[in-house]
Amino acid sequence: WQHQGRSLYGTDCAGNILYVGWQLGIPLEDDVCYLRGVPRAVLDAACAQRFVAIPVTEARPGDIIQIEHPKAPCHLAILADKGHPYSLIQSGLHWGHTVEHGYVRPWTTWTVGAWRYPGEIQPWEERGNV
């Protein structure tokens, strides 16, 4: 884990989201001039410039989940399908690295928004990857 990190050697929650988008070929603008605990309105505005807002109830694996955790009021994670029914992939100071765990309570109750990467994303296999 690295605050404002943007590489395989260390990322924060926003770095994970951007890194995945870049790997998918999405030209997302980066902004590394933010403090830990950025106000929710600032995170909302940054996400609105880069992603498509969706209802939380429509989120599916690959979408971005916005969380208001008591110790991290502005946090982002990627929804994944390893779990019952879903999991979250996220980075944070608490873990010290990127983790994947079940998307269950209390995480579901802390969810305050959901976002989708812009444009059509081809499945991994269709992009020539195996």
Image (tube, rainbow, N blue to C red):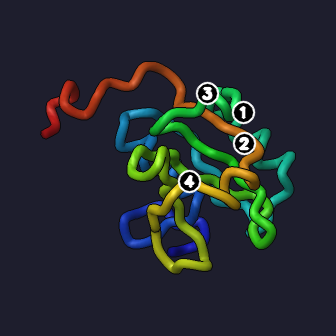
For label 1, the SS is: helix
Q: Residues within 10 Å of mark 4 (few under 14, many from 20)?
A: many
Residue under pointer 3: 58
Q: Is residue 28 visible?
A: yes
Amino acid type, callout 3: Glu
Amino acid type, callout 1: Ala
Give the number of the mark in front: 2 or 4.
4
Residue contact at pointers 1 and 2, CB within 8 angstroms: yes
- Image location (x, y in percent) of residue 104: 60, 55
Q: Residues within 10 Å of mark 1 (few under 14, many from 20)?
A: few
Question: Alpha carbon of mark 3 to alpha carbon of mark 2: how far?
Answer: 21 Å
Amino acid type, callout 2: Ala
Residue contact at pointers 2 and 4, CB within 8 angstroms: no
| Image quadrant containing the C terminus | top left
Could you tell which of marks 3 and 4 lies nearer the N-terminus?
3
Q: Residues within 10 Å of mark 3 (few under 14, many from 20)?
A: few
What residue is at 19 percent from the left and 31 percent from the top? 125
Name the disc covering residue 46, or none.
2
